[in-house]
């Protein structure tokens, strides 16, 4: 088969490596618009559950992704200046660039051709392929070119985000809620290398307007956030890498494939940074598409239909959880009166997928502290 993968993010690279390893006779090319080693953003977190999927299909890649990694086994929530620890939330953390480099190495070792600086702008560039995989991210060009067939919807959420880095170390995946005269700012912070942490700032439209953040330059916004989180940064600076304010779109598609073209990863469907599952969803897509070709061989229509049949239910379920998580952050100002323990308990149950009994098994200390609160503090 001649396979063209548009986009060298986690979804495209992982699928390319799996297909080529399985059948070396396939011609597999990845067309990536950016130069090698260019990436946006800082680190990503991946839950241990997400990486177990990788272990089943590519044990050597699992070893490469987890070797030497320090794992977070807990989270901390800071609300009203008080810290609440949430036990047994296990995450691996890594630089996005390291994740891409490991995947690129596995592609090259398998014989995949990686073409950097290759922006796909029209479908002519993909003529003659048996299979085209559109793994070109949330603003997918291929999806736009075939939009009447895929029928995408982009649900632009109201909150604003800016993705910074910082040399400040965090010993747990940290969620910090800080109120100031303008309103509420939330930081999602985690250390992902010996020297750097991700520091994603989120704020609602009212706070954004009151603080005038839309009119500030990138450097002024950064300084505003440094002031808002001065206690948490302990004098360390925030660092910028194209760290402009953006709003997140939840992407859905009515059709997942058309002819020999299939959508994968963020091009197919996004989660939300607040649930930290975009990379996981993308890599699970790659596994599901690969499994469909394992089952159906070179029968592209059967494989694409099989992929959608097998993958849609799990994908829809996780996306629904991501939307509930998004909504929790969008409405969290109504919960700021809660005692920090009740607030943390509410956070843990925000997606509707964790029951009180689940939480008691997972984190008995948190549930005991919650049950000991006087009723008024529980909200
Ligand atoms: C602020 C923020 C924080 C996040 N934090 C996390 C986290 O902690 N954990 C997590 O799992 N996920 C996180 N994510 C989500 C994660 O980054 C994505 O969900 C994931 O990278 C999706 O993988 P992908 O391969 O589908 O798309 P992408 O990673 O977006 O890759 C798409 C690739 O396609 C290329 N491309 C685009 N257009 C073209 C074109 N026309 N021609 C050729 N190439 C093209 C792009 O350059 C890019 O390399 C976060 C996202 C954001 C925005």
Image (spheres, rainbow, N blue to C red):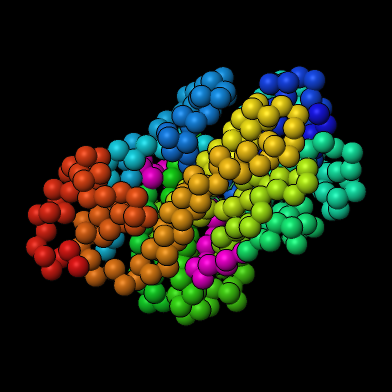
Q: Which span is picked out in magenta?
A: 154-173
Picture quadrant of residue 304:
top right
- Is residue 34 visible in the rendered image? The answer is no
Q: Does the magenta-highlighted stretch encompass residue 163?
A: yes
Q: Position of residue 112 (x, y in %)?
A: 76, 27
Residue at the image point whose x is 89% and y is 43% from the top:
127
Q: Position of residue 219 (x, y in %)?
A: 59, 64
Picture quadrant of residue 49:
top left
Foreground residue, 60 or 301?
301
Q: Looking at the picture, does residue 110 appear above or below residue 308?
A: above
- Is residue 148 visible in the rendered image? The answer is yes
Foreground residue, 156 or 94?
156
Q: Position of residue 230 (x, y in %)?
A: 39, 60
Q: Looking at the picture, does residue 319 appear above or below residue 244?
A: above
Foreground residue, 162 or 33?
33
Residue at the image point whose x is 86% and y is 50% from the top:
123
Residue at the image point whose x is 24% and y is 45% from the top:
359
Position of 310 with respect to 327 (left or right) is right
């Amino acid at each position: 088969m001649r396979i063209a993968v548009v986009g060298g993010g986690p979804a495209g690279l992982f699928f390319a490596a799996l297909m080529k390893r399985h059948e070396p006779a396939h011609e597999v090319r990845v067309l990536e618009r950016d130069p090698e080693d260019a990436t946006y953003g800082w680190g990503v977190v991946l839950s241990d559950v997400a990486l177990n999927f990788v272990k089943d299909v590519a044990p050597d890649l699992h070893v490469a992704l987890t070797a030497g990694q320090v794992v977070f086994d807990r989270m901390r929530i800071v609300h009203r200046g008080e810290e609440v620890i949430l036990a047994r939330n296990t995450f691996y953390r890594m630089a996005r660039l390291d994740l891409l480099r490991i995947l690129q190495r596995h592609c090259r070792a398998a014989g995949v051709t990686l073409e950097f600086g290759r922006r796909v702008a029209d479908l002519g560039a993909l003529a003659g392929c048996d299979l085209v995989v559109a793994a070109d991210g949330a603003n997918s060009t291929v999806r736009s070119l075939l939009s009447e067939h895929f029928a995408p919807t982009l649900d632009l959420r109201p909150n604003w985000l800016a993705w910074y880095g910082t040399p400040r170390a965090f010993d747990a995946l940290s969620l910090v809620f800080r109120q100031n005269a303008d309103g509420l700012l939330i930081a999602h912070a985690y250390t992902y290398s010996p020297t750097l942490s991700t520091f994603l700032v989120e704020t609602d439209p009212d706070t954004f307007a009151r603080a005038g953040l839309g009119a500030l330059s990138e450097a002024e916004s950064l300084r505003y956030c440094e002031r808002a989180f001065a206690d948490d940064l302990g004098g360390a600076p925030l660092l910028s890498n194209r760290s402009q304010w953006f709003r997140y779109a939840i992407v859905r598609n009515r059709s997942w494939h058309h002819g020999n073209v299939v959508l994968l990863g963020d091009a197919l469907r996004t989660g939300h940074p607040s649930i930290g599952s975009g990379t996981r969803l993308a890599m699970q897509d790659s596994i599901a598409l690969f499994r469909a070709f394992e089952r159906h061989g070179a029968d592209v229509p059967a494989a694409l239909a099989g992929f959608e049949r097998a993958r849609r239910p799990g994908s829809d379920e996780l996306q629904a959880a991501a939307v509930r998580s998004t909504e929790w952050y969008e409405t969290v100002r109504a919960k700021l009166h809660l005692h920090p323990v009740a607030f943390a308990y509410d956070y843990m149950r925000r997606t509707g997928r964790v029951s009180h009994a689940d939480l008691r098994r997972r984190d008995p200390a948190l549930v005991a502290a919650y049950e000991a609160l006087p009723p008024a503090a529980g909200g």
